[in-house]
Image (cartoon, grey):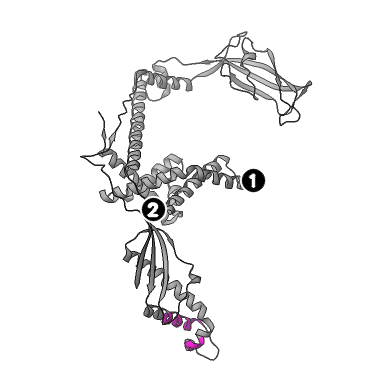
Amino acid sequence: MKLEVTELGPVKRAIKIEVPEDAVNREFDRVYTDLKRQVRIPGFRPGKAPVAMLEKRYAKAVEQDVIQRLVPTYYQRAIQEAGVAPVLVEIPPLERLKANRNTSLTFTATVEIKPSIELRDYRPPNPISLKPDSRTIADQDVEKALERFREQQSRLDAVPSGTLLAEGLYAVVTIEGFLDGEPVEGSKKEGLLHKVGTQKPVLGLTIDEVLVGKKEGDHGEIHQEYPATHPDARLAGKVVTFRVSILGVKQKILPALDDEFAKDCGAYDTLEALKDKIRSELEAALKRDIEEGYKDQIIERLLEMHHFDLPEALIEREIRTMVRQRLMEEQRKKDGTLSMNDQIHMEEEATRIQKEVAPGAQKRVKLGLVLEAIADKEGVSVSEQEIQDEFTKLARSLQVPLEDIQKMVESGGQSSRQELEDRIRAEKTLQLVYQFAVIQG
């Protein structure tokens, strides 16, 4: 086999491959031998038909069979001999190639390859330096978390008869719109619980002012003028009167912060034990957050430190992955099948998302290549147990059976499992670089 490699760019190569004449002839012989056993030619016993007759009848099919056998085999040999690891391969359509006896077969494969990366310092004595994050958990943080627990255990009780609504109290109301004395279809809300003072809109209206100072059984009105350009022709240029009826007044009752409250929150004998537990959980969460922040700093430094060309194929693959993930998230929220309009919308959305995620995709590809180079240098590997642990973590996170996660990955074939393994390896490598890093001061 003759081989000629031409550099088309930092990460692109053209590999011209020439299959020797004798290899072409042997393959033709094999194909015709196989063909003899398979076809039936009138006047000849099975396997005894002359090759010349087979050539007249099946020459084109045999030629394509020879090409389909030779090209993949010699392409694999060529990339091994050339010492390249393609991320994208472009081989001319096999039906356009020509193969003839007593003639070598020549074809060219264009490949994109991973770049050669010159790793910068990330280990002592020149580790990556990180800006310190000095956040700590203060007493007020514990008190705020305790108040959230208290809010969760609160209840709404009716206030004494005649109590006037004020900020912080809750009104149970019914609202309905009327136009020229007639109810407006779709404008009624019944038994709505509204906390006074929140200014939360109801049917597009702010009702707090009309509630303050009123009591159970009272009524109020809001006159809402709609512009002539309003999309609802019924309301355009009209004034709608919204009647607000107060069905009840309630107040939030918070439990006392004492040992009994702590017992209601779980296996805590005292309020101090609950506070200690809250503090430890807050500190653990803060530690994780600070560590993630440090790793974000490391990622930015790794991206800044290394400069190389990125294979377009990897960027396009990452963009497709990110778009698919976003569209799947949107579809999960809708929780239904796609209508024709939905499909059109999804196609338009995919185009928009592609432009939006392109810069991030380039960063992710670059970071992945840098971490892969570090992992190769440091000998980072992934064990079967680590893969199984990741399955368990995903199952717990998604709240689905472990077997479903395993089946989902297995259904994606070897590439899906490899993608999972690559992600674990990248996370381990980033953790390793983080352990080498130093925090300033």
Question: Residue at coordinates 39% horizontally, 17% vertically from top-left?
Answer: 259
> Can see residue 216?
yes
Question: Residue 250: where, in percent of width, then height?
Answer: 58, 15
Q: Is residue 403 above or below residue 265?
A: below
Question: Residue 97: where, in percent of width, then height?
Answer: 47, 72
Q: Which residues are magenta?
A: 28-53
Left or right: 36, with 75 as reference point: right
Location of residue 6 by image quarter = bottom left
Question: Residue at coordinates 30% horizontally, 41% vertically from top-left?
Answer: 431
Name the outermost residue toward the bottom. 43
Question: Residue at coordinates 40% horizontally, 25% vertically from top-left?
Answer: 266
Quadrant location of the C terminus in the rendered image: top left
What residue is disc 1 on? 341
Location of residue 82 by image quarter = bottom left
Question: Residue 236: where, in percent of width, then height?
Answer: 74, 27
Q: Residues within 10 Å of mark 2 (few under 14, many from 20)?
A: few
- Which amino acid is tagged 2? Gln
> Can see residue 382?
no
In whole angstroms, how far apart are the C-alphas of marks 1 and 2? 36 Å
Secondary structure found at label 2: helix
Name the outermost residue toward the left. 125
Check whether the beta carbons of the residues at disc 1 and disc 2 lie within 8 A of each other.
no
Residue sitting nearer the eye, 83 or 429? 83
What residue is disc 2 on? 418
Location of residue 122 by image quarter = top left
Q: Is residue 246 magenta?
A: no
Tag of residue 261: none
Question: Residue at coordinates 34% horizontally, 20% vertically from top-left?
Answer: 138
Secondary structure found at label 1: helix
Q: Is residue 51 magenta?
A: yes
- Which amino acid is tagged 1? Asn
